[in-house]
Amino acid sequence: MWASLTKHWFLTALAVCFAAGYFAADPLAPLLEMSLLRSGIVFIVMWAMGVTLRAETIRKSITKPLPSVIAILANVLLVPLLCLPTMWLLPEKLFGGLFVTAIVPCTLASASVWTRKAGGDDSIAMMTTVVTNLACVIVVPLGIWLVLAQQAEIDAVAQVRKLAIIVVAPLVLAQLMRRAGAGKWADRQKQRLSLLGQVGILVMVVFGAVASGSAAEGAGGEAVEASASWFAAAIVLASAVVVHCVALSLGIITAKRFKMSRESQIAVGIAGSQKTLMVGLQIAIDCGVSVVPMIVYHLGQLVIDTVVADRWRRKSGTVQE
């Protein structure tokens, strides 16, 4: 049991941090006023993840751009469209949280890591990661304006500016540092930088849990969060899993239809369906929607893609780190 907890410490810590923030929402409520602290944490984590990305691998995908284009379109358009039917199934705050999950960019590290584990082409995953993260300054405010305008009063211009500062700027800075000679240092410190990113995510989970707990208390104990309603929790879980699995499957099927290689099919499926927890938490808190769907989707993609990647690896006999 201890070995299992050690191996999956992040998932355990994620649950503990959410529970702690949710049930201690009242004393921790002042944290919600520290928007500069939240933005600073996101900036640091995005930089830590970005400085470990080897952007030179993108050159391979540029010569054959179609797989990357399909993965990007799946991530930016397909996943949000798949979430729209849940508008009639979920309470407003939970649907808002799930839609925010759908419009945030691809994960910075996980997509490439899982693609490599499955024996796929990580240059496609890298291209999808970079493009969707840079494009989020337009995609996220536009998505909020089109779908969540009634429940999230967000200044679109201010949101564009904020995303440019906390998402685009740290990624650009990180890659400039790599080009300036910090690449070897970042590669040596990859595990520590990854740990820094995970700790930052856990802190953001606490912020999100406090926001969720405060919303529940503000409603006088009414079941406004998934944790207060087993039915809503089941719908959120099912929706997140179905959306991810359908996006993953359609990405692979589309790549097959275009007669792409097995390596490209894997990359399109994984990169086209994964979403970043860090940016999702920040946007959900800013919009005042539930963070539960974002956390559930993230946990779901970790479990599902691990199973899928292991199966692909066994079929090909590929051994990946």
Image: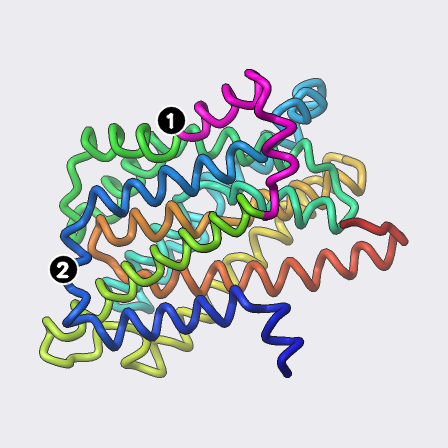
The numbered dot on residue 4 is none
The numbered dot on residue 169 is 1
- The image quarter containing residue 88 is bottom left
Is residue 302 covered in magenta? no
Disc 2 marks a residue whose amino acid type is: Pro
Mark 1, mark 2: which one is toward the viewer?
2
Q: Give the left or right position of residue 224, taking residue 118 as reference.
A: left
| Residue 230, position as x, y percentages in the image | 35, 83
Q: Give the left or right position of residue 275, taking residue 68 as reference.
A: left
Q: Is residue 309 above or below residue 36?
A: below
Residue at screen point 45% across, 41% down: 105
**Magenta-colored span:** 170-191
Disc 1 marks a residue whose amino acid type is: Ala
Q: Is residue 164 above or below residue 107?
A: above
Where does the N terminus fall, quadrant-wise? bottom right
Q: Nearer the viewer, residue 166 or 313?
A: 166
| CA gap, disc 1 and disc 2 | 28 Å
Residue at screen point 26% across, 43% down: 144
Q: Secondary structure at mark 1?
A: helix
Residue at screen point 63% across, 37% down: 125
The numbered dot on residue 30 is 2
- The image quarter containing residue 288 is bottom left
